[in-house]
């Protein structure tokens, strides 16, 4: 199947409240353009340099999502154009995004990445740390970021039971987070969970945004 066919068949299977991020990391601009021509406007990358190169070469009505782990010293390169940063897992990183966004007179949307997997290699915050961050005075003073929700990655496993347990756990954290009063920089509405192998489970567990790469563009090497 072509990129276009893959994309359209996934899209037509999604409930209306679920947003598809086409994860195009490692793929050439020609592949992204094929998805673009089939109507895709949201692309996810996990390296800032690669995302910036593709941003420069591609049409300007694309929303670029940074889905990977972000190094503080590289935030400045994406600050002019990134539309959503999925993997924010520290106050330090949030402060840097806020600082760089301010230089461009922008407000950058961010998702806080939660630790939900059993593997301890994955990044992310625990619920107590999330609460501490949201309640901190430093957070409350930030004007150039807005936290629009949470992101998480399940354990890499064949066990659907395990994956479902982790996504359900993240949905629980998200529901509790939504009980916090909203603020200009805090508007939780997005729950980013689910990739090629597990997005159907994620949607059943309440995901509103899925990040799909290989099922659209084919496997990566
Ligand atoms: C690569 C990646 C994806 C997409 O993975 P696929 O299995 O190819 O769909 C989703 N989320 C993150 C954070 C990724 O790094």
Image (cartoon, helix red, strand yellow):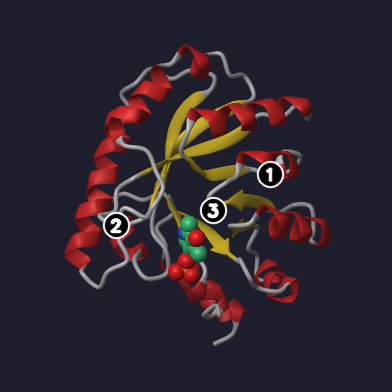
Q: Quick check: 88 left or right of 194?
A: right
Q: Earlier in the sequence, mark 1 or mark 2?
A: 1
Per the image, the residue denoted by label 3 is 68
Q: Position of residue 58 (x, y in %)?
A: 79, 61
Per the image, the residue denoted by label 1 is 74
Residue contact between numbered discs 1 and 3, judged by CB atoms under 8 Å: no
Q: Residue at x 66, y 50 (%)?
A: 63
Residue contact between numbered discs 1 and 2, judged by CB atoms under 8 Å: no
Label 1 sits on a secondary structure element that is: helix
Which residue is the extreme one toward the left?
A: 161
- Mark 3: is the Cβ under 8 angstroms from ligand 1? yes
Q: Residue at x 54, y 29 (%)?
A: 92
Q: Position of residue 37 (x, y in %)?
A: 71, 70
Relative to residue 70, is residue 101 depicted above or below? above
Q: Earlier in the sequence, mark 1 or mark 3?
A: 3
Mark pair 3, 2: CA separation: 17 Å
Relative to residue 71, is residue 136 depicted above or below? above
Which residue is the extreme one toward the bottom?
A: 1
Q: Give the label, 3 or 2, closer to the camera.
A: 2
Q: Between 181 and 18, which is closer to the camera in this rendering?
A: 181
Binning the other alpha carbons within 10 Å of mark 2 as few (below 14), some (14 to 19) or many (20 upward) gives: few
Q: Which mark is residue 119?
A: 2
Binning the other alpha carbons within 10 Å of mark 3 as few (below 14), some (14 to 19) or many (20 upward) gives: some
Label 2 sits on a secondary structure element that is: loop
Quarter of the image for the C terminus: give it: bottom right
């Amino acid at each position: 199947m072509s990129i276009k066919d893959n994309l359209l068949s996934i899209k037509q299977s999604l409930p209306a409240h679920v947003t598809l991020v086409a994860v195009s990391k490692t793929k050439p601009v020609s592949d992204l353009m094929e998805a673009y021509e089939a109507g895709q406007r949201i692309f996810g990358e996990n390296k800032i340099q690669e995302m910036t190169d593709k941003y420069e070469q591609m049409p300007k009505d694309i929303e670029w999502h940074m889905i990977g782990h972000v190094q503080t010293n590289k935030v400045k390169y994406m600050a002019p154009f990134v539309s959503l940063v999925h993997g924010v897992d520290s106050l330090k990183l949030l402060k840097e995004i806020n600082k760089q966004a301010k230089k461009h007179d922008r407000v950058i949307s961010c998702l806080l990445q939660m630790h939900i997997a059993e593997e301890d290699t994955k990044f992310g915050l625990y619920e107590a740390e999330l609460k501490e961050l949201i309640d901190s005075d430093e957070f409350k003073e930030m004007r150039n970021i807005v936290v629009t929700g949470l992101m998480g990655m399940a354990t890499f496993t064949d066990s659907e039971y395990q994956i479902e347990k982790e996504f359900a756990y993240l949905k629980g954290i998200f529901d509790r987070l939504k009980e916090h009063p909203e603020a200009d920089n805090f508007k939780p509405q997005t729950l980013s969970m689910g990739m090629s192998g597990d997005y159907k489970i994620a949607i059943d567990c309440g995901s509103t945004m899925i990040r799909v790469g290989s099922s659209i563009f084919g496997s990566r090497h």
